[in-house]
Image (cartoon, helix red, strand yellow):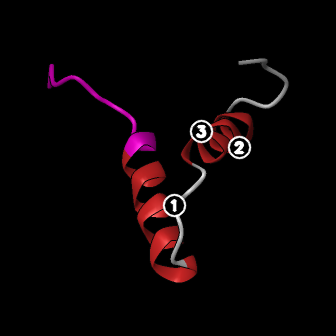
Amino acid sequence: AGAKAINGLPMLLWQGAQSFEWWFNQPAPVEAMRAGLEAAIHPGQAG
């Protein structure tokens, strides 16, 4: 009890980015991936 909880979105983002780079042999569009992840988690919110 009393532990600080954090979400795993950064880890999910960077695991996805690494996988993208392995599969497609090109840099991952990290900012687009971040925006898509945020939109999926918080639908209807800008940012």
Callouts 2 and 3 close, C-beta under 8 Å: no
As measured in the structure, the alpha-carbon distance from the residue carrying label 1 to the one carrying label 2 is 17 Å
Residue 19's spot in the image, x, y percent?
46, 72
Extent of the magenta region? 1-10
Mark 2, secondary structure of its residue: helix
- Residue at x-position 74% and y-position 35%: 39
Quarter where residue 7 is shown: top left
Q: Nearer the viewer, mark 3 or mark 1?
A: 1
Asked if residue 10 is positioned above or below residue 19 in the image, the reply reads above
Residue 25's spot in the image, x, y percent?
51, 77
**Residue furthest right as drawn:** 44
- Residue at x-position 40% and y-position 41%: 10
Q: Earlier in the sequence, mark 2 or mark 3?
A: 3
Q: Which of marks 2 and 3 is in front?
A: 3
* Quarter occupied by the N terminus: top left
Asked if residue 38 is positioned above or below residue 29 in the image, the reply reads above
Q: What residue type is labelled 2?
A: Gly
Circle 3 residues within 10 Å: few <14, some 14–19, many ≥20? few
